[in-house]
Image: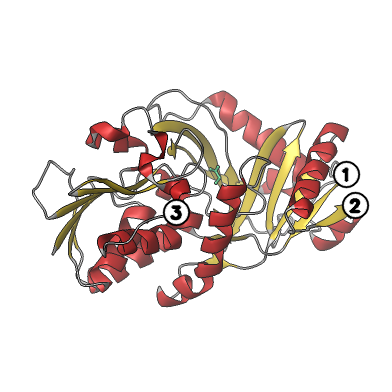
Amino acid sequence: MELVVAGGGVIGLTCAWRAAQAGWAVGLFDPDPESGSSWVAGGMLAPVTEAWPGEEELLELGLRSVALWPEFAAELGDPGLHTGGTVVAATGTGDRAELDSLADHLARLGRPVERLTGRELRRLEPALGPDVRGGLSVPADLSVDNRALLASLRTAAEKAGVRIEERAYRGEPADTLLICAGAHSAALHPALRGLVRPVKGEILRLAHRRGAFPMPGRTVRALVDGRPVYLVPRPNGLVVGATQSEQGFDTEPTVGGVRDLLRDAERIVPGIAEYGLVEVAAGLRPGSPDNLPLIGRLDDRTLVATGHSRNGILLAPLTAQLIVAVLDGGSVPAAVDPGRFG
Ligand code: GLY
C-alpha cells in the first residue's frame, strides 16, 4: 500500500518513518524541510509547564507522549535529548501568583510540582539573576535539539525506505494521503478550512562565548511582568523564545519581538549579555480552535496530523502511533479526531 505524506517537519517525518516500518511504501514531499516551524522551534518537551487550566486533555496527551520520548530518542541514535529538566521563574508579584495558581492546578490534577524561593532556584541554577523571586522545579519536562532531531528522523526515515522529494506536493495520486503541512495544511483539504491557522513565533539563538557566565543546565522558563520567555540549553548556547502573535503567514522577525525576548531573557539570566546573537527567526505554529491537534481521517483516502500548536515536537511520537493505528483501521481518541468540530 502506498502512502504520500505532504510535509516534512517533525510530524511528517515521524509519521512517514513509522508508516514505512509498518510496511507502507511511503513518499514524502516538502519543498524546503529546513525552514518550517520544526526547524525554527525551541524543542521543549514540556507537558507540565505548558499546562494551563482548561487544557487537561492536552496535558494528558503530552504526558503520554513525553513518556514515549526516551525510547523514541534511543531508536533514533542521538537526536540531542536533554534530560536536565525545567525550572520556571517568576519576577513580580503577579508572576508569582500566576505560577502559584499553575502549581495549585497541577496539584489538584495529582501532579504536584516543587515550589522554590528565588534563593533555592539560584542554588539549582546559578545563572539565574537577582530579579527571580520564586518559581517551580519540574524535572520531568525535557527538551531536544530540534535540528539534530530533524536530521536523525530523515536518516531513519530514508533507511526505512521513505522516498523524500524536496518539492511541494501537487496532488500526486496515492492510495492514501497524509497531510502534515503544519500551518499550511488548511490549503490541502476543504475539511481543514478554518481549523488550522498560523500563529507566529519569533525566536533567537545565542552562542556561549569564552569567558561568559556559564549556561543554565536546565530549560529556564519565566514570566517577566506577565510576558512568558524561555531559554533552552543546547551544547554551545541557548535558544530564546518565543513571541506569539497572529499575523497570517508573516515570517519576518520584528525589532519589537527581538527587543522583548532579549530584555526579558536578560532579566532572568543576566549573563546572556556576554553571549553571541547568532540567529533571529520566526516560525508559524499550526494553531487549532481548541489547542489540541487534529489527528485522524478526513475522508476515505485522506488522513491528517496537524494543529499541534505549541507542542508538535513533544507530540510527535504519540501522533505517529495514532496515525499508524488509523492506517491499520483503528480509531483515535475523540479529543484529537478532526471531525470533532462538526
Ligand atoms: N513550544 C513553545 C512555543 O511554541 O513557543
For mark 1, give the secondary structure.
Answer: loop
Q: CA distance from mark 3 to mark 2?
A: 40 Å
Horizontal side of 6 relative to 183 (left or right) equals left
Mark 3 vs mark 2: in front:
3
Name the kind of residue labelled 3 in the image.
Answer: Pro
Residue at x 77%, y 30% (from the top left corner): 225
- Closer to us: 337 or 245: 337
The answer to whether residue 270 is visible is no
Say whether mark 1 is within 8 Å of ligand 1: no
Q: State the quadrant of the C terminus.
A: top left
Mark 1 neighbour class, 10 Å CA radius: few under 14, some 14 to 19, many 20 or more? many
Q: Which mark is residue 133?
A: 1
Query: Based on the displayed image, in which of its 4 quarters is residue 94 positioned?
Result: top right
Q: CA distance from mark 1 to mark 3?
A: 41 Å
Q: Earlier in the sequence, mark 1 or mark 3?
A: 1
Q: CA distance from mark 2 to mark 1?
A: 6 Å
Query: Based on the displayed image, in which of its 4 quarters is residue 10 positioned?
Result: bottom left
Q: Which mark is residue 68?
A: none
Report the residue marked by disc 3: 333
- Closer to us: 122 or 180: 180
Report the residue marked by disc 2: 117
The answer to whether the residues at label 2 and label 1 have Cβ atoms under 8 Å apart is yes
Residue at x 44%, y 54% (from the top left corner): 333
Residue at x 58%, y 55% (from the top left corner): 60
Against 62, residue 95 (above or below) is above
